[in-house]
Image: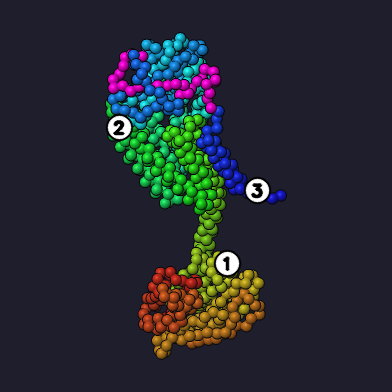
Amino acid sequence: MKEVKPYKSIHTFLQIVLYLGFVVLFCGCLDLHSEVTPDRQFQQSVYLLDRYFFWSSEELKDPHSIPENVWKKMDSNQLGFESIENQYLYIKFSDQFVRQLKSPVLYAEIALEQFKIFQGNELVFESKLKDHIFPYVIPLNQNPSGSLIIQFQSRYRGFIGMDRDVYLKDHSMALVDLFLDNFSETFFAPILLVLSTIFLGFYFLRKREIIFLNFSILLFSASLIEAFNGFVGFSLTQFSYIVVPLTYFNIAFFPFALLLFLIGIFPPFFRNLFKILASIHLIVFFVSILSNYEDGISFLNSDDDYNWVIVLEAIGAIFSSVYVLIKGNNNLRAITLGLLIIVFAGLHDILVDLEFFRHGHRVIHYGFFLMLALFGFYVFKHYWQLLHSINRMNAELRTKNKELQRLIQIDKDLALAHALQKSLLSSKYNEDERIRIIGFSQNLESVGGDYFDHTKDSMGNWAILMADVSGHGISSAMVAAMSKMAFVGAGPFLQFPSRVFHLMNRHLVGKTKNLFITASYVFIDTESYTATFSNAGHPGFFLIRNSEPDVIYLNAKGKPLGLFSHLPFAEEMVKLKPGDRILLYTDGIFDLLNEEGESFGEERLKSLLWDNRYQKFQELATIVQDSLFRFSSGWKYQMDDLSFLLVEIK
């Protein structure tokens, strides 16, 4: 069966959402809903009836006293006029349909600023609210008086008069229609508020993820816009002194909240662009508020003054969205589609206000919900990926903790192995009335394969062994311990170096797992002042005698221990004199490097011994050790374990 990739499903989902969004917007732009006609009982649109207007420089107490010949007929699709300073606008239309209604009301979706309604000679309603944009349901007398006259006075520079749909309806039907018309907004507002709270909780759980805080703010602003739109705003008319400013501030804040959300998502260039737009938005908003203060803030005029910023932000959103889509950034596809939908929906709304499109369904709300749905999809996807990354990090952390515990245990084992190896080695200083010995060892790791031993027999003679196991680390240290045991087993034959190596090799062959041991062994007879020595693949040793012209190098043929059985080992002898000094060492000294990559080498060691031949015994040992330390910058360039034994004949 062919596997279905999840990303392909997500891509299909986004395409479906995009197609549905543009179908909704396209239908809204075409305004395909059924047109209100005069034969639709008791829901006649006022602008389909004859209407007349009259401008007056002063307020008239009895508008019905206006002569018939001064009234001018309005266009059939006209909603209102541009404001004229210090002028009152009067609009008159017939109230003949009220007799067919049980409880007649004038339903106005939006009536801007202050106005009065006269039915005949009677003042039936007066609104003193400023910047009020919520619906009105105004009771009327059931007996027609011939005409309704509305007197308008507005400080709003852009428009004066009725706006949107105006109907004569029955009171109960008007309330039901108002609720049904705004049902989606009323229903989704608490859902958006709950989602805002949820994402705020996500932010506190994941404080570094600012995207959750920004999206929570965006959802909260959206919930207020939807909550105060239509039916809820109408229900809270008595609290208009709070609801109206809150509504206007929130409408202005929503684009800013949207920019904050985008700043945390888009690539750096667009992030900086949105930061600039957000700063301009705040500056222009507050300037427009201050410049439109007239007996209180004029929110409607302020709204007109910063609309150009909204247009600028829309252009920036379109540009960034198109660029990201062209570049094929799949992570931002949902965000860019949501931006394009809300921009085109807002553009349709503006064109309706400018009367390029006939007023019908306000698709801004459909675009609004589609945008939030796509944004929510992106944020939930981000949260899902975050959870997976956290689970992956936790799994990696558990693995690393186990590895750390294993390493800690290894360190403990190494420390124990180091202590055990130290206990196996002979002391670094030994002396009697005829001989003096000083040893030094520097492992590359905690434990190593270098090993030296010196022991005295019952006759006062000395057996001295210097050994080096191939490699370094724990395995070499274990083989070194085995060689120590093998050397102890050869104790009865210390005066015969070749026999010692033969017995050690017999005990080690087949047990070292391809590791081998090189060694140099010297037996010093303190009665005859002779040194008998053998070698098992190890560097020889140096004899420093002041009466000689140079350091003497002594060696004997032999192969390493632990590889082959029945190996012959050569045995040689040299006469010693009082004051002679012998240096046994491992090849780690020769392999020691300096900062330039030069090795210490055999010749450098010989020169060091000869130049300091007249130094006291202990000072000579210190000079050799310090020279090696300084050469490698504090063992920084050490390549192998290194050791030496310095022996002096008294």
Q: Nearer the viewer, residue 109 or 255?
A: 109
Query: Gap in Å between the C-alphas at discs 3 and 1?
Result: 52 Å
Residue projecting furthest to the top: 143
Assess disc 1: are there few (<14), some (14-19) or many (≥20) residues with their C-alpha within 10 Å of its C-alpha: some
Which residue occupies 42% across, 34% down? 354
Element marked by disc 2: loop
Q: Is residue 63 magenta?
A: yes
Part of the protein shown in magenta? 35-64
**Label 2 vs 1, first from the N-terminus:** 2
Element marked by disc 3: loop
Q: Amino acid at mark 3?
A: Val
Assess disc 3: are there few (<14), some (14-19) or many (≥20) residues with their C-alpha within 10 Å of its C-alpha: few
Rendered-image quadrant of the C terminus: bottom left
- Asked if disc 3 and disc 1 are in contact, CB closer than 8 Å, the reply is no
Residue labelled with disc 1: 475
Decide: is 177 above or below 408: above
- The image position of residue 319, as x and y in percent, is 45, 48
- The image position of residue 281, as x and y in percent, is 36, 40
Q: Amino acid at mark 2?
A: Asn
Q: Relative to 72, is 34 on the left or the right?
A: right
- Camera sees residue 116: no
Q: Nearer the viewer, residue 415 or 175?
A: 175
Predominant SS of the magenta segment: loop
Q: Which mark is residue 4?
A: 3
